[in-house]
C-alpha cells in the first residue's frame, strides 16, 4: 500500500493479520502484532511462557515493497535515536524466501537507500547488492529461520538498552512502553557479549528471544522481531524507551510504583494494538523524511 500523501510504500503489513479461517480462528494474544481490536489476553501462554505469534500474512509483500520497507525501517530506527554510526541493522524477509533484505555494511541506518541494500541468503551469501554481508547477519538469518511467521528483525546498539542491561535488574512496567512485555521481564541473551558472527550464536540468540517481541543483549544491544515490519521496528523502539524510563526512575530512587501483571497485560493489548503500532511507525517514517525539528525521541 502506498501513502496517499507521500506515495511512499507503507506495506500491506500495516493491515491486521487475517487467517484463512477468519478472525474467529485467530489465536488470542496480547502482543501488538497479533492482537485484533476486539481481542484481549485469554490467559493462555505457550510452553515457553509467551503468547503465541500470529501466522504470517496469507499474501506476502512484493520484492519491491520489501526493499522499500527495509529502507523505511532503517531510517525510522535512526529517527528514533537508535543509530550507532554504521552499526546496527534491520532485516526484512524476502517474500520469495530467498533470504533477507538488509543494508550493506559501511552505511549508517539514516543513510540507507535501495541501492545500498543486499539480498543475503540463509547461507549468508550475498545474492544481490555489493560487498560482503554484515558479520552479524546471522542474527537475522537465524531469528527469521527459527520462526517462519516472522517478517522482520532488528538489531541495534541502543544506548538505553545497553545501559539498562548492565544493571541486570528486571524490566518493570513503569510506563506504557514497559507494558509491551505484559508484566514479564524482557528475555536476555547471555551466551556472549561479543559479535553474533556465527550461525551457532544466531541460533542461541533466536532461542533466547523465543516468542517474545524483543530481547536484551547485555554488553551489546537489543534484538526485536515482528510478524510485520512496523511491529519489529516499534518493538525495538518501545524496548529502548522502556529501558530509558526505568533508568531515569532508578537514578532518582527505588522504583515503587509500576503496573501489576494484570494491568500490564491489559495495557499491552490496549496501548499497543496494530493501529497504535502502525501509527507510531508512520510517525517515525515521517520523522525520518522530514527536517530534524526535534531531538531524537
Ligand atoms: Zn551488534
Image (spheres, rainbow, N blue to C red):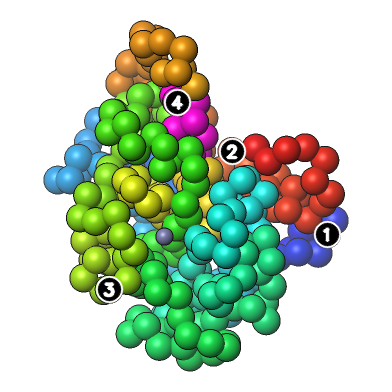
Q: Earlier in the sequence, mark 2 or mark 1?
A: 1
Residue behind mark 3: 198
Q: Residues within 10 Å of mark 3 (few under 14, many from 20)?
A: some
**Label 2 SS:** helix
The quadrant in which the C terminus is found is: top right
Residue 220, horizontal then vertical, whole percent: 37, 52
Q: Relative to 93, is 62 on the left or the right? A: right
User: Within the image, what quadrant is residue 276 found in?
Assistant: top right
Q: Quadrant of ligand 1?
A: bottom left
Q: Earlier in the sequence, mark 4 or mark 1?
A: 1
Residue 247 disc label: 4
Q: Are marks 2 and 3 in contact (CB under 8 Å)?
A: no
Q: Are marks 4 and 1 in contact (CB under 8 Å)?
A: no
Q: In this figure, which residue is indicated by the disc labeled 1?
A: 6
Q: Which residue is mark 2?
A: 276
Q: Earlier in the sequence, mark 2 or mark 4?
A: 4
Q: Is there CB contact under 8 Å for labels 2 and 1?
A: no
Closest to the camera, between mark 2 and mark 4, is: 4
Whichever of callouts 3 and 1 sits on the residue coming sooner in the sequence is: 1
Image quarter where the N terminus lies is bottom right
Amino acid at each position: 500500500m502506498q501513502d496517499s500523501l507521500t506515495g511512499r510504500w507503507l506495506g500491506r503489513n500495516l493491515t491486521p493479520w487475517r487467517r484463512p479461517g477468519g478472525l474467529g480462528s485467530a489465536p488470542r494474544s496480547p502482543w501488538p502484532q497479533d492482537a485484533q481490536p476486539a481481542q484481549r489476553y485469554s490467559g493462555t501462554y505457550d510452553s515457553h511462557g509467551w503468547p503465541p505469534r500470529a501466522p504470517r500474512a496469507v499474501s506476502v509483500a512484493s520484492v519491491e515493497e520489501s526493499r522499500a520497507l527495509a529502507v523505511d525501517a532503517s531510517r525510522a530506527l535512526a529517527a528514533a535515536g537508535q543509530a550507532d554510526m554504521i552499526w546496527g541493522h534491520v532485516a526484512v524477509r524476502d517474500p520469495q524466501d530467498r533470504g533477507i533484505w538488509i543494508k550493506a555494511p559501511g552505511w549508517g541506518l539514516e543513510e540507507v537507500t535501495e541501492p545500498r541494500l543486499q539480498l543475503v541468503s540463509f547461507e549468508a551469501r550475498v545474492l544481490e547488492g555489493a560487498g560482503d554481508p554484515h558479520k552479524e547477519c546471522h542474527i537475522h538469518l537465524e531469528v527469521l529461520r527459527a520462526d517462519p511467521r516472522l517478517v522482520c528483525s532488528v538489531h541495534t546498539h541502543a544506548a538505553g538498552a545497553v545501559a539498562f542491561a548492565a544493571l541486570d535488574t528486571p524490566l518493570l512496567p513503569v510506563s506504557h512502553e514497559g507494558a509491551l512485555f505484559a508484566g514479564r521481564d524482557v528475555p536476555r541473551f547471555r551466551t556472549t557479549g561479543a559479535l553474533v558472527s556465527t550461525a551457532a550464536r544466531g541460533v542461541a540468540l533466536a532461542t533466547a528471544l523465543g516468542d517474545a517481541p524483543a530481547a536484551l543483549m547485555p554488553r551489546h544491544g537489543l534484538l526485536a522481531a515482528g510478524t510485520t515490519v512496523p511491529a519489529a521496528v516499534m518493538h525495538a523502539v518501545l524496548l529502548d524507551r522502556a529501558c530509558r524510563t526505568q533508568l531515569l526512575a532508578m537514578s532518582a530512587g527505588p522504583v515503587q510504583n509500576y503496573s501489576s501483571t494484570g494491568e500490564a497485560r491489559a495495557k499491552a493489548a490496549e496501548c499497543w494494538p496494530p493501529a497504535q503500532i502502525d501509527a507510531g511507525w508512520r510517525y517515525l517514517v515521517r520523522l525520518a523524511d522530514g527536517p530534524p525539528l526535534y531531538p531524537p525521541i
